[in-house]
Image (spheres, helix red, strand yellow):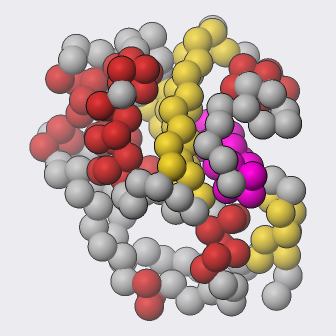
Amino acid sequence: MPVTNHAGLMCPKFNGRLELLAGPPKVGDSFYQVSPKPHPIDSAALKLEASSAHLAQCFNFANQGWVLNMVNNYRARVGSPPVQYNWQLERMANDHSVYQYNANTMTHYDPAGDLGTRMTRMGINWQAIGENVAFNYPDEGSVMDGWLRSPGHERNIRNPSFTQMGVARVGNYWTQVFMRTF
């Protein structure tokens, strides 16, 4: 199977089509009424030619739509404006989760530095940033519950100056990145 370098790892190159049986909630009138419980995904529907352990090092398994829904639901309850999903921030979150997974440690730092240094090196012109990391939460609902019970993490989630968010899960390592640009 062909491989590609992703965050310093040799990962399987998937050239086919991958369809999940469930997706993120639809944005609309019922946006804030969607349950934060993710839909189960039939793992038999995912047929890739690589071990799940190796895939966990290479791909973001977070359901971004559910996390975005839970973040914006909470922000609405506390009077903060909604954030929009940013795929560039997801890439940063995924790369950091890959690093944490490979280093087997939860941290806000990696060899490229802290979040601000990493964002600047990627050419992102940011005004305000925040990062939440977590380890060993089995799903989106439980990691959000953990972050909301932690004052510093909750402060990032509610921060009204943030306008964009990205999130990733690699193995049991979660990274959530918030930003406001100039």
Residue 40 part of the magenta segment:
no
The one of 80 and 173 positioned closer to us in this rendering: 173
Q: Does residue 146 lie above or below 53 as drawn?
A: above
> Left or right: 10 with respect to 135?
right
Residue at (24%, 29%) from the top-left corner? 74
Residue 64: % across, % down: 44, 50
Q: Does residue 64 lie above or below 107 as drawn?
A: below
Q: Main secondary structure of the magenta part?
A: helix
Residue 96: % across, % down: 69, 43
> Left or right: 95 with respect to 41?
right
The one of 29 and 36 positioned closer to us in this rendering: 36
Q: Quadrant of residue 48?
A: bottom right
> Left or right: 178 with respect to 96?
left
> Left or right: 61 with respect to 58?
left
Name the residue furthest front.
105
The part of the chain drawn in magenta is 87-103
Position of the N terminus, as image quadrant, is bottom right
Residue 148: % across, % down: 31, 31
Position of the C terminus, as image quadrant, is top right
Residue at (85%, 36%) from the top-left corner? 111
Q: Does residue 19 lie above or below 171 as drawn?
A: below
The answer to whether residue 26 of the structure is visible from this angle is no
Residue at (23%, 57%) from the top-left corner? 37
